[in-house]
Image: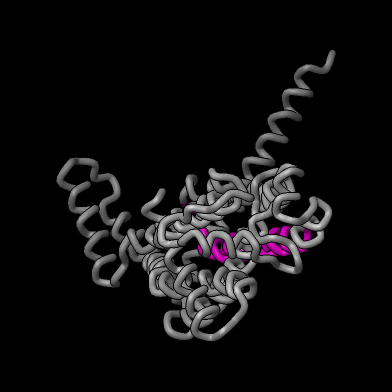
């Protein structure tokens, strides 16, 4: 993961140099500020891709009635030529409306390696192979002095590389204790859990409003995502209290989710003005939802009727 860790380290280094060397901010505050500015740097670079992702989802939703019309025009035609014409017709409609499948995948494919790279970088700095008290050799673009000042950097008097589950001996080497780390880590974990869950629920509700009820796979995924909610809520607590979750990473987590909340709201508000849901989509969505609800209702009552009939048949005469 050096291909990701080194660029992340380079961004941290550049912001630290700007804050500490050019603006005269003390090294401790400069490292805390560098982590916050790392979030802004990465998310600003990804903002155009994130906008494309939201916009692509909106385009596909508005195209759904037209795509179904195309599919209905080929209904009953299962030969190879007809299937090829159907694919071409759907693809042509999507291209005419500037819809690209990759727009929905690229931002996530970029963000995940960056987060993993940051995590591995923070762990390498927090747990140097030469030991916390030994002379440091540096890592990637970070020189030995910068690694040392990062190890000494603190947030509310707690070292940035420390974490709750760190061994007592290493905590002592960093000049802190588990109790002191908890005082800072617990609020960060609580905020990370709250903001992550809020963003997840917002995303779920947003996707639910455009759910394609005619597709069983889409309904199944929506159900799975709903049941994943408690996992999203609990994961920051489990990871933050039992895993190697440095205070620096928790700070990044909180800031990143605050950006996500503001970005999601802002982009949605922008799309509601420039590319609102069409009336055709709204009618199509309500129709498919109504059909699905009626189908579930009929199946439910059909099962009850079947059970009642079976019970009557089993009664002694």
Residue 252 appears left or right of 216: right
Magenta highlight on residue 73: no
Residue 106, percent from left and from top:
37, 60
At 50% from the left and 77% from the top, the residue drawn is 267
What are the residue bounds of the magenta stretch?
186-214
Q: Is residue 47 above or below residue 78?
A: below
**Residue 241 image offset from top left, x and y in percent:** 74, 48
Q: Is residue 26 visible?
A: yes
Residue 300 drawn above or below residue 212: above
Residue found at x 51% / y 57%: 118
**Residue 8 in view:** no
- Please say if 72 is above or below 308: below
Q: Residue 200 versus residue 220: which sits nearer the camera?
A: 200
Relative to the observer, which residue lies in front, 288 or 192? Answer: 192
Residue at image x 26%, y 52%? 74
Q: Quadrant of residue 197?
A: bottom right
Residue drawn at 55 percent across, 48 percent down: 128
Expressed as whole percent of the image width and height from the top left, the position of residue 170 reads 70, 46
Q: In which quadrant of the rendered view does residue 54 lie? A: bottom left
């Amino acid at each position: 993961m050096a291909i990701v860790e080194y660029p992340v380290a380079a961004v941290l280094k550049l912001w630290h140099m700007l804050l500490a060397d050019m603006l005269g901010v003390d090294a401790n505050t400069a490292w805390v500020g560098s982590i916050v500015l790392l979030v802004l740097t990465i998310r600003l670079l990804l903002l155009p891709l994130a906008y494309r992702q939201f916009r692509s989802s909106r385009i596909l939703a508005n195209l759904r009635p037209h795509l179904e019309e195309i599919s209905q025009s080929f209904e009953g035609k299962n030969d190879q030529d007809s299937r090829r014409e159907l694919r071409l017709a759907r693809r042509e409609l999507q291209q005419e409306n500037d819809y690209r499948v990759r727009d929905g995948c690229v931002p996530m494919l970029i963000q995940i390696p960056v987060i993993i790279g940051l995590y591995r970088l923070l762990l390498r700095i927090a747990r140097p192979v030469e030991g916390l008290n030994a002379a440091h050799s540096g890592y990637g673009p970070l020189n030995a002095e910068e690694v040392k000042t990062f190890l000494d950097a603190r947030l509310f008097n707690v070292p940035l590389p420390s974490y709750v589950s760190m061994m007592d001996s290493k905590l002592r080497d960093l000049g802190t204790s588990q109790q002191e780390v908890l005082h800072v880590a617990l609020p960060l974990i609580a905020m990370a859990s709250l903001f992550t869950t809020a963003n997840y629920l917002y995303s779920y509700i947003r996707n639910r409003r455009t759910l394609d009820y005619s597709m069983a796979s889409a309904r199944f995924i929506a159900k799975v995502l709903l049941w994943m909610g408690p996992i999203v809520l609990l994961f920051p607590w489990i990871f933050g209290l039992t895993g190697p979750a440095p205070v620096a990473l928790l700070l990044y987590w909180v800031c990143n989710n605050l950006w996500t909340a503001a970005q999601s709201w802002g982009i949605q508000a922008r799309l509601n003005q420039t590319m609102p849901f069409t009336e055709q989509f709204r009618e199509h969505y309500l129709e498919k939802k109504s059909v699905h609800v009626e189908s579930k209702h009929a199946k439910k009552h059909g099962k009850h009727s079947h059970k009642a009939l079976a019970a009557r048949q089993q009664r002694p005469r």
